[in-house]
Image (cartoon, grey):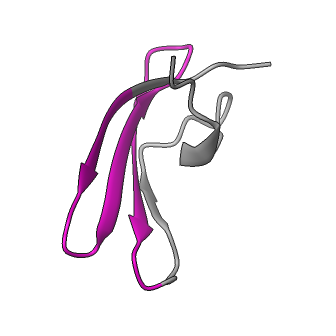
Amino acid sequence: MTQNTLVSRHLTSDGVVVWTRCACGRLRMDLVPNAGGTPLTAGPCTRCASGPGRADQS
């Protein structure tokens, strides 16, 4: 199982922006909208892809 590391989480007027770093070192940004819209992702790693809810938060 690939483990992602939570880098930061920020509240914005549109929702929550979550930055994670995958095991291979690539940085990923996810926007989780407040209004239940479609999440937006930038920089997903095709080998290590997982959603923001699966990031290692320890």
| Residue 55 versus residue 12 in the image, above or below | above
Q: Residue furthest front?
A: 58
Which contiguous range is marked in magenta?
7-35
Residue at 39% from the left image edge and 77% from the top image edge: 34
Q: Quadrant of the N terminus?
A: top right
The residue depicted at 42 percent of the width and 32 percent of the height is 20
Query: Residue at the spot x=34%, y=59% of the render?
Result: 16
Residue 26 in the figure: left or right of residue 13:
right
Q: x and y percent of residue 21 in the render? A: 44, 24
At horizontal 51% and vertical 42% (from top left) the residue drawn is 44
Q: Above or below — where is 18 with respect to 24?
A: below
Q: Nearer the viewer, residue 3 or 25?
A: 3
Picture coordinates of residue 54, whole percent (x, y): 64, 38
**Chief secondary structure of the magenta portion:** strand
Across and down, in percent, residue 32 comes to 44, 64
Tell me which corner region of the image, top left, top right, bottom left or bottom right, holds residue 4: top right
Residue sitting nearer the eye, 27 or 9: 9
- 1 lies left or right of 4: right
Q: Position of residue 7 (x, y in %)?
A: 34, 26
